[in-house]
Amino acid sequence: MISVWREAGQSNFDFHQANLPLSYGELIDLASYPKACFGVVRSEAGQKSALIISHFWTPNTAAWDNYSYHYITEGEWAPYASPAGLHAARAPSRILEQLDDLESSKMHQHDKQRALAWREACQQWNAQQSAKVKPKKGQLVVFEKPYVFRDGSRGDTFIYQGGALFKLWGGKDNCLWQLRGWRQKPFSVEDIPETPELGALGELFG
């Protein structure tokens, strides 16, 4: 794991394109997530393969190094081969579709097998995500595990606002919460239940 001081405002793509060793190839695309990034690298021969980047920020502003990262190729992947663990096999379809076929790859056979296992694990993950129900604005999203906020409070039921924005169901304020990576978490979707008062009004004026 490499640790450096990184200034805010620079994109992950620009940072890693500038810092990736030449031995990995040229970084031409990158999909970024909180625990891992997934890149497409192109070799001098034009072969396109995947690069997995485990990374995290250190929130302590007094630290000498505030950003840590680790590179592995798809041919080096194993379920726990990097600090990101299983999160390292969640590359989106946009990245997978750009990779060259492994049959034409110059990887060793063992590396090809690992790369194939990684691609299949990513495809399986993407299929699971696509199969999840998609909430509509105004519906309740109930997470299996609650989110824990900075003040120590917890919440598992939110009103979907679109994108990654939610309002806490039953919250005393009207704050919007941006829940990054929420689609990767187990959840269910429900309609907001009618209160008895609203139900009676509906019958009266329906």
Image (cartoon, grey):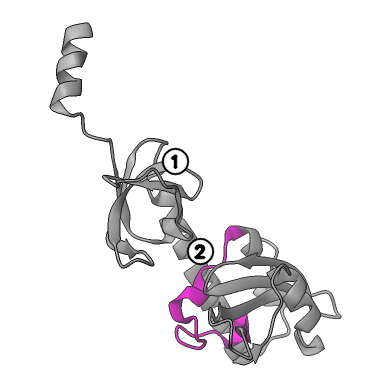
Magenta stretch: includes residue 88: yes
Q: Nearer the viewer, mark 1 or mark 2?
A: 1
Residue 105 or 44: which is nearer the viewer?
44
- Relative to residue 21, is residue 116 depicted above or below? above
Across and down, in percent, residue 61 comes to 58, 81
Residue 148, quarter of the rendered image: bottom left
In depth, the one of 53 and 67 nearer the eye is: 67
- Local SS, label 2: helix
Q: Please, is residue 168 above or below residue 100 in the view? A: above
For the C terminus, the quadrant is: top left
Residue 95 in the figure: left or right of residue 189: right
Pinpoint residue 41: horizontal percent, then vertical percent: 74, 75
* Most distant residue in the right direction: 44
Is 182 included in the stretch rendered in magenta? no
Vertical placement of residue 58 versus 154, above or below? below
- Estimate how packed mark 1 is, as few (under 14), some (14 to 19) or many (20 or more) residues with alpha carbons within 10 Å: some
Give the percent coordinates (x, y) of residue 52: 61, 78
Comes first in the chain, label 1 or label 2:
2
- Residue 161, disc: 1
Residue matched to label 2? 123
**Residue type at numbered disc 1:** Gln
Q: Which residue is painted at 31% across and 68% down in the image?
A: 152
Position of the N terminus, as image quadrant, is bottom right
Q: Which residues are magenta?
A: 69-93
| Disc 2 residue type (three-letter) | Gln
Q: Which mark is residue 82?
A: none
Q: Residue at x 66, y 75 (%)?
A: 50
Secondary element type, mark 1: strand
Drawn side of residue 203 relative to residue 39, left or right: left
- Residue 151 screen position, x and y as percent: 34, 66
Tell me the CA gap for discs 1 and 2.
28 Å
